[in-house]
Amino acid sequence: MTTTAEGLLPHFRSAWGPDTCYPDSRDEWSPDNPSRDQCGMTALVVQDVLGGDLVLAEVHVDGVKVGHHYWNVLPDGAKLDLTGDQFLPEEEVVGGTVVVRPPEGPRRHREQYELLRERVLASLAAPPLEDGPGQARS
């Protein structure tokens, strides 16, 4: 199985759900914005598949910190942010620092990470679907 950064997004889009986002945000999750509150788990699974570094930044509204955002820097130095489309117009991602992944795996939201990882890896291993409306896979 050869996996590229460009080919990952459809696998994540089909795997994201209210059960893979941050538990405190579950009631706010919507299929209209499926990457919302999926960044930490997504960045960890991307790192599992492609390697590279995790980057952590703050999310601000009107200059006030309201949350955090994670994304990846791949081994070739390319930035990959599969959840960068989640933000509302008033939200701004500020800064970004490489962080070390805990060797024992995620301490928080482990259940959501493991579920997302399982779904994405199963999707990557599955044979491609026939091309058709809403069925194309990379």
Image (cartoon, rainbow, N blue to C red):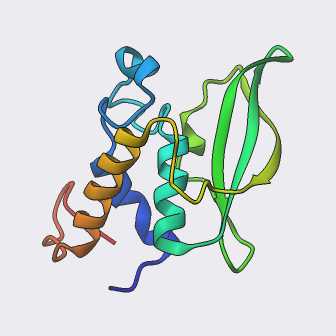
- Where residue 119 appears, as percent x and y from the top left, is 26, 55
**Which residue sits furthest bottom?**
2
- Image height of 89 relative to 138, above or below: above
- Image height of 84 relative to 47, above or below: above
- Where residue 50 appears, as percent x and y from the top left, is 52, 73
- Image height of 29 relative to 96, above or below: above
Q: Quadrant of the C terminus?
A: bottom left
- Where residue 57 appears, as percent x and y from the top left, is 76, 40
Residue 95, by quadrant, is top right
Name the residue: 35% across, 56% down: 117
- Image height of 16 relative to 121, above or below: above
**Which residue sits furthest front?**
104
Name the residue: 51% across, 47% down: 106
Left or right for 78, reference 102: right
Q: Nearer the viewer, residue 95 or 54?
A: 54
Name the residue: 40% across, 46% down: 113
Q: Quadrant of the N terminus?
A: bottom left
Left or right for 111, reference 126: right
Number of dots carrying numbers: 0
Left or right for 39, reference 80: left
Q: Nearer the viewer, residue 24 or 134?
A: 24
- Where residue 135 appears, as percent x and y from the top left, is 19, 60
Residue 12, by quadrant, is bottom left
